[in-house]
Amino acid sequence: MIRGIIMKERVLILGAGYGGSVIANVLAREFRNRIANDELEINLLDKNDINTNQGGYTFIPFELYTPEEITKPRKKLISPRVKTFFGEDGEVTSLDLPDQEVTVRSGKKYGYDYLVIAMGCRADIDAVPGLVDDLNTFYTSMDDAFKVRDLVKTIRNGKVVVAVASMPIPCPGAPMKFTFMLESYLRNIKKCEENVEKNCREDVELSMVWPIELIGPAEYNNLVTDECKRKDIKIIRNFQLARVDASKKELTSVNGEKLNYDILITVPPHKAPQVLIDGGLADENGWLSADKATLQYRGPVGNFDNVYVVGDLGPAEILKTGIGAHYQAIAVSHDIINSIYGNGIKTPYMGETGCPLVTELESAGTEGKGYIATWKYGVPLAPFTTTKMGWYFYRMYYHIHWDISVKGLF
């Protein structure tokens, strides 16, 4: 307070995806009176004004959701108490953490007292030579997911490879989920054009190429390994993708192993947005370092307790899932609330995360099967199985997401 004037506190959120939206909405509800009295402002920046539930990309190739079901205008999801800036006024071009200032494409500058960096991560396709020459992926955009849909419709026989280039990636359970759905689609839904009584699965050799040994936590790995054996899906582990030769239809690993394919569907390498790397904020692996519990920035430019890192651009050791982003956002929201109130209470992120799994599509002759597995720091994932109810709940969640989850109502 200066001569009776209360200084306005400023919260700046970079990225209006899942994590950023939750934080904006939770803070707007908590501080509605302070915002009305012009004692606090929340600014939310993003380069576009459409929110996409990217987990839905996995389902687009099987026509289980429409674009309208997995996208919403950000204005409909964010509290009107939050000041939103999209386009050139929301696209970040530089961050100055010591001076607490962010610059955007239009040249406008935003100061802050609390900063949340929740800008997501991006595909780094050029990191694998030759990948761009045969790129089929459901990870990068709606258009690419529809391209995979069209490709899936052409599958009749041959070697189909789903390859994860390297770790970490956002939603690391999605490639396995996609592979199971593809297998179920070929076995139970897609028929051979020459013989409508015969499905295509027996003529397709389906493989999952995985860059490390374990596919998720131990119990998750156990379940998917057993399912792959039962469904005759070959898992090729510890195959980090080094090169794609589209002319030869050949993959090469960093260890020199070779693998041929007829159809390739790839999850490319990922890293933080280039603006954060160019600004020197990222670590040597292209991610933003943060304390695993407080999520406060701890990186090359220093340690900043008023700067939080949320979601897919965080350190490699924090799993990049939508469930994780949600619980990170709740923890950060409460920490900022407590800090503004000055009550000294800290709200740590306890590592709550999860990974939905689908092992079977619903069809005329089969029940859909799914499960949303969850765990946290020090509490490993318990044994589980996929169920019909899990399938319905997971499908339903994509609608609940917009009205409850993004708005931070739980």
Image (cartoon, helix red, strand yellow):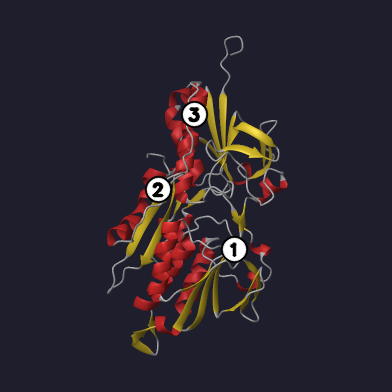
Quarter of the figure with the N terminus: top right
Give the residue at x 67% y 71%. 130
Give the residue at x 38% y 63%. 358
Q: Which mark is residue 346?
A: 3
**Tag 3 secondary structure:** loop
What's the distance in space between the residues labelled 2 and 1, CA to CA? 27 Å
The amino acid type, in three-letter code, at marker 3 is Lys
Instruction: Examine the rendered structure and indicate whether residue 332 appears above or below residue 362.
Output: above
Instruction: Examine the rendered structure and indicate whether residue 331 appears above or below residue 73.
Output: above
The amino acid type, in three-letter code, at marker 1 is Pro
**Earlier-in-chain disc, 1 versus 3:** 1
User: In the rendered image, which quarter is residue 265 located in?
Assistant: bottom right
Left or right: 185, with 272 as reference point: left
Q: Nearer the viewer, residue 91 or 381?
A: 381
Tell which tag, 1 or 3, sits nearer the viewer: 3
Residue 73, x across and y down, in percent: 47, 48
Residue 156, x across and y down, in percent: 45, 83
Quarter of the figure with the C terminus: top left
What's the distance in space between the residues labelled 2 and 3, CA to CA? 29 Å
**Earlier-in-chain disc, 2 versus 3:** 3
The amino acid type, in three-letter code, at marker 2 is Trp
Q: Which mark is residue 268?
A: 1
Q: Which residue is mark 2?
A: 402
Does the residue at mark 2 contact the one at mark 1 (Cβ under 8 Å)? no
Give the residue at x 43% y 44%. 406
Q: Residue furthest bottom?
A: 194
Does the residue at mark 1 contact the one at mark 3 (Cβ under 8 Å)? no
User: In the rendered image, which quarter is residue 267 located in?
Assistant: bottom right
Does the residue at mark 2 contact the one at mark 3 (Cβ under 8 Å)? no
Is residue 68 at all visible to an observer of this figure?
no
User: In the rendered image, which quarter is residue 128 located in?
Assistant: bottom right
Q: Which mark is residue 7?
A: none
